[in-house]
Image: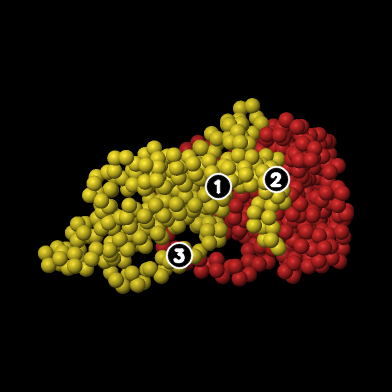
Chain colours: A red, B yellow
Amino acid sequence: MNQKITHHARRRLMAAGAIGSMTLLAACGGDSEGGGGGEDELTPVSLQLQWLPQGQFAGYFAAQELGYFEDEGLEVEILESGGDIVPQDALGNGEVDYAIAWVPKVLETMEATGVELTNIAQTFQRSGTLQVSWADSDIESVADFEGKRIGSWGFGNEWEIFAAMAEEDLDASTVEIITQDFNMNAFLEGDIDAAQAMTYNEYAQLLQSTDPDTGELYTEDDFTVIEYEETGGAMLQDAIWADTERLESDEEYAETTVAFLRAVIRGWIAAAETPEEAAEFTMNAGSGWDQPHELWMVNETNKLIWPAEEGFGVINEQAWDDTVAGAMAAVNEQGASPISEEPSDSAWSNEYIEQALADLEGEDLDLTGENWEPTEVTFDEAAATE
Amino acid sequence: MTAAPSTPNTGLFSRTGPPGSRATWLWGVIGILLLLLLWEGYKAIGPEAGVVLGDTRLLPRTSDLAMPHTWDMVTRLFEGETQARNASPLWVTVVSASAFTLGIAAAGWLAGVVVGVGLALVMLRWKIAEWALLPWIVLSQTVPIIAFAPVVRSWGAQLELGPIQWEGWMSVALIASWLAFFPIAVGALKGLQSPETAHVELMHTYSVGWWTTLLRLRLPAAVPYLLAALRLGAANAVIGAVVAEISTGQRGGIGRLLIQFAGQASSDPAKAWGPIFGAVALGLVAAGSVAMLGVILSKYRRTEEK
């Protein structure tokens, strides 16, 4: 897209002026971590998340905190986003080794820029996106969106909405898309009729908010919830992406990938078994949320991962095809689609995750989550009033 | 400026009182009280849904979600950051984040001073450099940070500087310096060019070299301009640091707190205001620090309007 052109122009412009201050800054930063080498040689690996540290990524933090990465000979740096850092761009630019990102967003980037990435593990087996409206509104399904103010975060998070609408033969121009903030205030204040919410975060925010009419917390009865997983618009979300070219040409990277995935599997199994501990890890990583919210997030995230019939992270071909079809069918209010043609076959591969699962087969690990049970998390008054 | 060294009795309405006098402080307090009064007054009598003209919102909603009570925002600062038993009070989190950002902004500001003054000197020395550089310097400021920040981070991550590893905060400081160097370069150039032609020619007739002219005539004359430029640069560095923290996903500073707590504003509206107060205080401290520079350099500030 034309954004690319200016991107390059900027890069050149910047380079012209910035070099002076750059070297100066580098000189100020003399206190870089003083080596630390010498001991067992760990392979440095960087993982780019797609948002702030939070329960959505609990398994990666668990793998870090419980030493699973280190056991695999990896020294993993988990990089947060939370701003303008786009994980698939960071990976495509070679800044990081792996990235967590939603499938339709990466497909969009790959088609727009020509960069080649491979989905090596589908962490979330199902979609966690909701569209929430008030219980007394007349919005009960996607078909009811017509003429309504529909909230979305944009930045590629909106494609499920448009795919689901396309499924109902609803044109994007029949609704008013309103860009949502980081919180649910626009919905609570009545600026949005149906707000986008993730089961693991924004929906919990609603349940932690006080109803000014009653002075008590809202409950699930106050809302009508449309789950995109139940619509034709469901798309695959959090997946682990790797650099296609490196996977093919760099044997060490391919090996590291399998080792990395083994540790990630262990991490998510730990998050499934001890969600309280996983919530603790993400709080230690700087989530800034209260424990009840964090525990809710880990628990809901677990529901998106487990059970995984064929094992953690194995990409279901049908779900992949549905995501591709949805991405091709979705048309936003400007008439644009994320992708116009099917991605190449190298866009996903079960080779690495299946190898990692096979390596862990003999151990006492519930690789499919068949025995996993979600916990019950509720929010009480005390945690919310302040 | 009058010949009298100082006016002994500074009344409330006198503008000549030295900074830091009781009257100045009093005015500061009155200003804050007025702001509080305005906030609570509007909240009390303003319409719940705010004032909307057509599709444009002129005045905000008065709900507790949009405008928490001032006392709620203040008391929130003294409650724990989270519900956890061992959580530190919110103000501690805000202050330490502000200090982190201030440090980055200061590094960016220093880099901006060096680059800005350096560019000004080059442009002063060679007229052709001024023609060649000035348009680019102006153009540099039209690049939006949100587009520019990921590129800087990406660039830094791939940079090899011998033993020095490029760290996230350096990207933030670089962006802060990018915003800071502009007013400094322009202001310094203007200041260095400010001596009257007669004075410059006098130096000429003494057959004094360029460097001595710079040191004895141009630099002292530039001080008033430079101080204003440094202050602008400091404000820019702070804004640049906060925005760049958000853009590059840098944790530890006030920028991260702003988005983190904004995300919690539905269930905890007052908390989101903590980092906003922090950002305001940050700006004041930065401006105040540069003002202190002005006190040190006061003997060169003859031409400045008081």
Question: Secondary structure under badge 3?
Answer: helix
The residue lying at 63 percent from left, 69 percent from top is A1
In the rendered image, which quarter contains the C terminus of chain A? Answer: top right
The residue sitting at 37% across, 46% down in the picture is B14
Residue A124, relative to residue A347: is it above or below? above
Q: How dense is the environment of label 2, judged by Cα within 10 Å: few (below 14), some, or many (20 and up)?
A: some
Residue B63, labelled with which disc? 2
Across and down, in percent, residue B260 comes to: 62, 44
Q: Residues within 10 Å of mark 3 (few under 14, many from 20)?
A: some
Look at mark 3 in the image and give the residue it sits on. B140
Residue at which label 1 appears:
B255
Label 2 – label 3 distance at C-alpha: 41 Å
Q: What residue appears at the point 32 percent right and 55 percent down from the top-left corner? A: B305
Q: Where is residue B211 in the image (x, y as percent from the top left)?
A: 20, 60
Q: In this view, does B297 lie to the left or right of B209?
A: right
Chain letter for the residue marked with disc 3 in the picture: B
Report whether mark 1 lies on the same chain as mark 2. Answer: yes
Q: Mark 3 or mark 1: which comes first in sequence?
A: 3
Q: Is residue B163 above or below residue A149?
A: above
How far apart are the alpha carbons under marks 3 and 1?
A: 23 Å
- Callout 1 secondary element: helix
Q: Which chain carries label 2?
A: B
The amino acid at mark 3 is Ser
Marks 2 & 3 on one chain: yes
> Which three-letter amino acid code belongs to the residue tagged 1?
Gly
User: In terms of image quadrants, where is residue A235?
Assistant: bottom right
Which is nearer the N-term, disc 2 or disc 3?
Answer: 2
Tell me the tag on residue B86. Answer: none
Q: Is residue A98 above or below residue A273?
A: below
Question: How far across and how far down the image is residue A226, in percent?
Answer: 84, 51
